Image: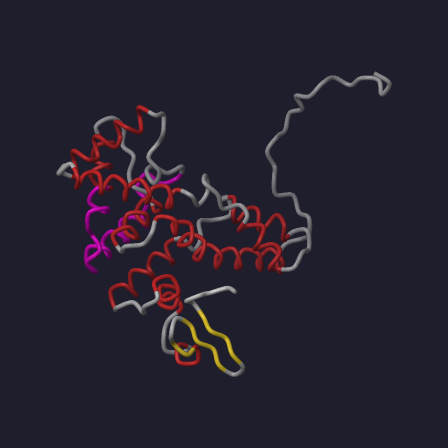
Amino acid sequence: MWKTGISKIEPNHIVTRGYRQEDLIGSVPFASVFFLLLTGKKPDKNEAKMIDALITSSVDHGVTPPTTHAARLVASAGVPLPTAVAAGVLAVGDVHGGAIEEGARILQEWVRKGKEKTWSEEKTASELLKHLRGIGRRMPGFGHRIHRQDPRTQRLFVLARDLGFEREHVKLSMAIEKEFAVRKALPINVDGAIAAIISDMGFDWRLGKAFFLIGRVAGMIAHVYEEMTSQKPMRRMCTQETEYDGPWERPSKE
């Protein structure tokens, strides 16, 4: 027998985390229902505003990210909208969309470690980066291929401070940014900001990709619809040159 604490479905009766779904409809915003589904409780005013901001920050970043590119490429083949969006979802992984999860895992681990050793945020940041360099790893959530200063990061951190979510993980991420600046400036990007804030909100790091995914799906739907309604089928999207580096032509009997 399956057991779930998320929903109960009976004839003419739907309960979601203890609330009748008809009572949630029109009275609780979507982002707050998402929070309810994850935590089992409705968010307070500050949590609701922060969750909505986190989702919005991931909603879109142009046509070049793998999620959007994959979704539009598959849409150009004439498939239904859900198929094209699903193709974009399948592009979410450890490299694209994964920095939030891994960044949150590292921040949560090292905040615990810093508390155990009674280190300051600065000392924890220094030891963390020293450890990562020693094992040949990079700190996720810092630097960006386009932005020198990610505008989404600053807005999220202002909201986190105003709403009471600038706590140990946000402070550690800021200390890491300062530690990086000694060698090379690597500002916190939106993934790093989300990783720190959801950690300070008490979310398990394994939900990191969820916050990216729930926002980005909305953007992908818009891109797929645009592709379906304004572009020619099977149009050429990948224009970069290719070079064959396989074997020379040879006889079929060889």
Does residue 249 appear to the left or right of 243 in the view shown?
right
**Nearer-the-camera pick, 87 or 168:** 168
- Quarter of the figure with residue 131: top left
Image: 40 above or below 77: below
In the rendered image, residue 147 lying in the magenta stretch gets the answer yes
Does residue 232 appear to the left or right of 56 in the view shown?
right
Image: 245 above or below 61: above
Does residue 1 appear to the left or right of 248 in the view shown?
left
Where residue 90 appears, as percent x and y from the top left, is 55, 48
Q: Which residue corresponds to the image point at 43% horizontal and 67% vertical from the top-left?
A: 6
Where residue 11 appears, as percent x and y from the top left, is 54, 82
- Quarter of the figure with residue 41: bottom left
**What segment is highlighted magenta in the picture?**
146-172
Q: Which residue corresponds to the image point at 43% horizontal and 57% vertical from the top-left?
A: 215
Identify the image quadrant of the C terminus.
top right
Where residue 89 appears, as percent x and y from the top left, is 53, 51
The secondary structure making up most of the magenta span is: helix
In the rendered image, residue 48 lying in the magenta stretch gets the answer no
- Quarter of the figure with residue 115: top left
Q: Which residue corresponds to the image point at 23% horizontal and 55% vertical from the top-left?
A: 160
